[in-house]
Amino acid sequence: MKKQFLILTISAFVTSFSYAQKADVRLEKKYSQKEITQMIQDNPAQYNVLVYALDHACYVIDKPVEKDLSGFTTIPVDVSKPINFLDLGLEIKDQNQYFLIQGTSKMLVVKSNWVLNHELTTKK
């Protein structure tokens, strides 16, 4: 009986450890290790979108001159470095998000969940 319990305990540990090894540690800025492991197990598609989003969700554009941008939020962004939505305290939402970049004539675009899913399913 003790032998079976020990085997079960070791296999559970190895399984959880293997999930932890697959996890992208950059997600730990928002999610606990337990939440990441749970997401990998329960919703791997969403996990894959979030990992993809870490490198592909954000891009910078020039401010459109003809539009009224007074309702947009201004945020500080170092455009000389790769931009990660979690580093900025942002989330992936159901619609694209647009932010004015403080001290520049640029805007930050954060792609929506739909756009990221579409990119993942159509990329070759």
Image (tube, rainbow, N blue to C red):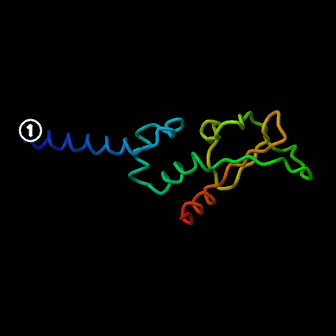
**Amino acid beneath label 1:** Lys
Classify mark 1: helix, strand or loop. Answer: helix
Residue 122: image location, x then y, percent: 57, 66
Q: Is residue 56 left or right of residue 43?
A: right
State the residue at coordinates (65%, 40%). Answer: 83
Q: Is residue 19 left or right of residue 61?
A: left
Q: Nearer the viewer, residue 96 or 124?
A: 124
> Which quadrant of the view contains residue 89?
top right
> Which quadrant of the view contains residue 76?
top right
Residue 12: image location, x then y, percent: 25, 43
Residue 9: image location, x then y, percent: 20, 40
Q: Is residue 115 above or below residue 81?
A: below
Q: Nearer the viewer, residue 99 or 58?
A: 58
Q: Is residue 56 left or right of residue 15?
A: right
> Which quadrant of the view contains residue 118?
bottom right
- The residue identified by callout 1 is 2
Q: Is residue 76 above or below residue 8?
A: above
Q: Is residue 78 above or below residue 35?
A: above
Q: Nearer the viewer, residue 5 or 69?
A: 69
State the residue at coordinates (49%, 53%). Answer: 48
In the picture, which quadrant includes the N terminus?
A: top left
Q: How many marks?
A: 1
User: How would you rate the neighbour count of disc 1 (Cα within 10 Å): few for under 14, some for 14-19, many for 20 or more?
Assistant: few
Q: Is residue 57 left or right of residue 23?
A: right
State the residue at coordinates (8%, 40%). Answer: 3
